[in-house]
Amino acid sequence: MFKQMTDDDNKLNSKHHTLYKKDIESKEVKVSKDTYKKIPKHIAYRMFITSFHERERGLHDIFNQLWDADEHDTLELRINSYGGFVNEGSQFHSLIKNKFKGKTTTVLDSCGYSMGALIFCMGDKRVITPRSDLMFHDYSGAIWGKGGEIESQFKHKTEHLREFFADVIVKPKFLKKKEYQKMLTGTDFWMKPKELCQRGIATHVLVDGEEIKAKKYLKLMS
């Protein structure tokens, strides 16, 4: 059973994120008829995310715990989010790529819009349900200051953020380059489960308690 990490565990919960963990004992798993794979003892982390708007407390405690994870520990991010701060999403991206590469599962429990969609795309294994909903769009924000400062900030932030977006959704070909250009001019891309599977954004679908591969789900739909 996953155990919630409360204030007694060094305040590892925040307003919009809840972190749980589960100790997994060493075991052997059958991968083919005569082949077994040994899974070493490790901790499985599970985080529920509703928003990327941690203005008050921040995610320092949670990220500190995850950055201290051992080599074989795994991370599961369960998403039901309308989005939020890009900088916060960028922190997750850095954590996944540098600490949980090849060991991250993202689950789209309900909706994943804006940054919620990008976080879902960061998983090595990406699981949806028949009711999952996803949306990509360009960033929004505001800049203030003197005229020259506004101009330089706008240019820098635009290049920086759009490179990040392209790395997450264009590089793995979740959006075509022409589609990405349309996104940058204001087009929103809304996707239901069938399209998520067709594009390879979803790798698995949870149906009636059974996790099946996206290709099998598409065959069942047809």
Image (cartoon, helix red, strand yellow):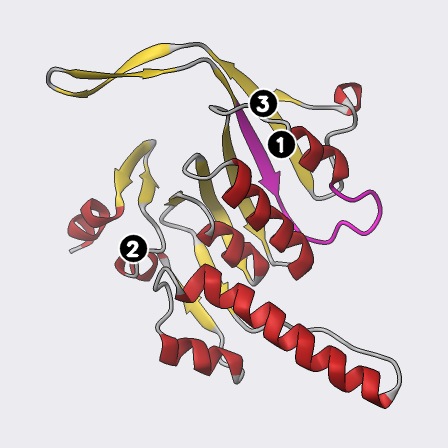
Residues shaded magenta? 44-59
Question: Between disc 2 and disc 3, whose residue precedes?
Answer: 3
- Dot 1: what SS? helix
User: Separation of disc 2 and disc 1 at Cα?
Assistant: 30 Å
Classify 10 Å Cα crowding around label 1: few (below 14), some (14-19), many (20 and above).
Answer: some
Instruction: Report the residue at 53% width, 71% height from top.
Output: 137
Judging from the image, what secondary structure is the residue with disc 3 in? strand
Camera-side mark, 3 or 1: 1
**Residue at 53% from the left image edge and 69% from the top image edge:** 163
**Spot occupied by residue 57 in the image (x, y as percentages of width and height):** 82, 42
Q: Residue furthest right?
A: 146
Tell me: 175 left or right of 112: left
Q: What label does residue 66 carry, if any?
A: 1
Amino acid type at image mark 3: Lys
Task: Tell me which numbered mark, 3 or 1, is placed earlier along the sequence.
Answer: 3
Q: Are marks 2 and 3 in contact (CB under 8 Å)?
A: no
Is there CB contact under 8 Å for labels 3 and 1? no
Could you tell me which secondary element the residue under label 2 belongs to? helix
Q: Which of 33/158 is in front?
A: 158
Q: Which residue is mark 3?
A: 21
Amino acid marked by disc 2: Cys
> Does any portion of residue 91 appear in the rendered image?
yes
For the C terminus, give its image quadrant.
Answer: bottom left
Which of the labelled discs sits on residue 212, or is there none? Answer: none
Task: Choose between 9 and 80: the one closer to the eye.
Answer: 9
Is 46 magenta? The answer is yes
Q: Residues within 10 Å of mark 3 (few under 14, many from 20)?
A: some
Q: Which residue is mark 2?
A: 197
Residue 23 percent across, percent down from the top left: 53, 14
- Depth check, mark 2 against mark 1: the one in front is 1
* Left or right for 1, reference 148: left
